[in-house]
Image (spheres, rainbow, N blue to C red):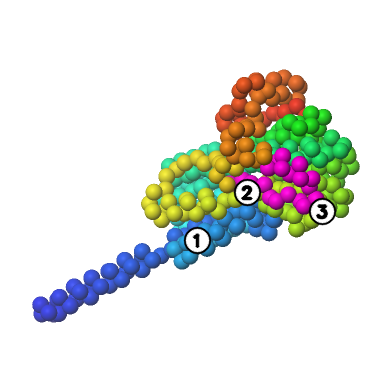
Amino acid sequence: MKMTRRAGLGLVLAMATGLFGAAQALAADPLKVGFVYVGPIGDHGYSYQHEQGRLAVEKHFGDKVKTTYVENVPEGADAERVIRQLAASGHQLIFTTSFGFMNPTVKVAKQFPKVKFEHATGYMRAANLSTYMARFYEGRYAAGVAAGRLTKSNKLGYIASFPIPEVVRGANAFTLGARSVNPKAEVRVVWVNSWYDPGKEREAAEALMAQGVDVMAQHTDSAAPVQAAEEKGIWAIGQASDMSRFGPKSHLTAIVDDWSGYYIDRVQAVLDGTWKSADTWKGFDAGMVHLAPFNPATPAAVRDEALKVEAEIKDHKLHPFAGPVKDQSGKVVIPAGKTASDEDLLKMNWFVEGVVGSMPK
């Protein structure tokens, strides 16, 4: 069929208009961001705080992003399957938020080189895989100072999840903080081999209290230890978020994780086209960690001392692992005048003097 010049121009304009409209629609497509959680978002601890970060992303970016989360993902084959499904379904940025997700994330990242991945608390990176972590140990040291002042039995408790450097480092920092003000304080460690298991966490809390522990910290995610402490009338220190609602009388403070700023910054980088693989490890100074408000019944002098320690760590005037630091055998591991390097902290597999307990083989 012969086409007139006017008809031809009309067709060209129609095609151009259609392409422009398609381009506009494409440009308007939201960035799909996925989050993978090891526990339920209602754990009121670690996964809960990551979920608050996801919600902050939605609030900040509005319809520029579309987020998805998967909770209660076991560390292992199930994690790999979930991460792959997110990548295959068009998610351009995926946050995997537990140490045991590291190898599955690395494997899927190799299979989807155009997708950007971020893994929390791990150490393996690639061109499309970043790592990020908070310096939780800073908060544990400051909370330990308060615990060392408040204990009457000189027996403190620490409910530990898995024997990985992050958890060992946390127990050590808590112990060092307590013994900086009370050299007689000892920290008894009980392992539950789970990040979130209210039943096991309560059993661990009860076992510690039966040993005479009167201040208890946790590196697990449920509120069960705080609830158990409330029933027995001892102090408890929450994990990852403010757990005071579960123990109004017992909850001393908590080491609070705040991922909101980091998540917003990384999503913005993808939208701007400036995202690059990196390793981020920040603490009090960047607001990724802070202490929850102290219980109103806390003696003012104890509260003020802990907050002063928090400020000194934030200003880099105090380091929780400044020497001299001895291990359980009494051997000096960090000499006077020296401070543990990040490399040393990231591979920490020994307990400091004052810890009662051992690491599972």
Q: Magenta segment, which residues?
A: 288-307
Q: In the rendered structure, does residue 124 fall within the stretch colored magenta?
A: no
Q: Residue at x 74, y 37 (%)?
A: 145
Under circle 2, the secondary element is strand
Q: Looking at the picture, how far across and down is residue 256, in whole percent?
A: 65, 49
Under circle 3, the secondary element is loop
Against 319, residue 270 (above or below) is below
Judging depth in this view, the residue of 215 and 94 nearest the camera is 215
Q: Counting residues from the N terminus, which is met first, the one under dot 2 or under dot 3?
A: 3
Q: Quadrant of residue 218?
A: top right
- Verify CB contact (< 8 Å) between mark 3 and mark 1: no
Q: Residue at x 60, y 53 (%)?
A: 50
Looking at the image, can residue 270 be seen? yes
Query: Which label lies toward us, 3 or 1?
Result: 3
- Verify CB contact (< 8 Å) between mark 2 and mark 3: no
Q: In the rendered structure, does residue 303 fall within the stretch colored magenta?
A: yes
Residue marked by disc 2: 257
As measured in the structure, the alpha-carbon distance from the residue carrying label 1 to the one carrying label 2 is 19 Å
Counting other residues with Cα less than 10 Å from the Cα at mark 2, is it few (<14), some (14-19), or many (20 or more)? many
Query: Which label lies toward us, 2 or 3?
Result: 3
For badge 1, the amino acid type reads His
Residue marked by disc 1: 60
Under circle 1, the secondary element is helix
Q: Residue at x 55, y 59 (%)?
A: 56
Counting other residues with Cα less than 10 Å from the Cα at mark 3, is it few (<14), some (14-19), or many (20 or more)? many
Location of the N terminus (image quadrant):
bottom left
Residue marked by disc 3: 249
Judging depth in this view, the residue of 78 and 86 nearest the camera is 86
For badge 2, the amino acid type reads Asp
Location of the C terminus (image quadrant):
top right
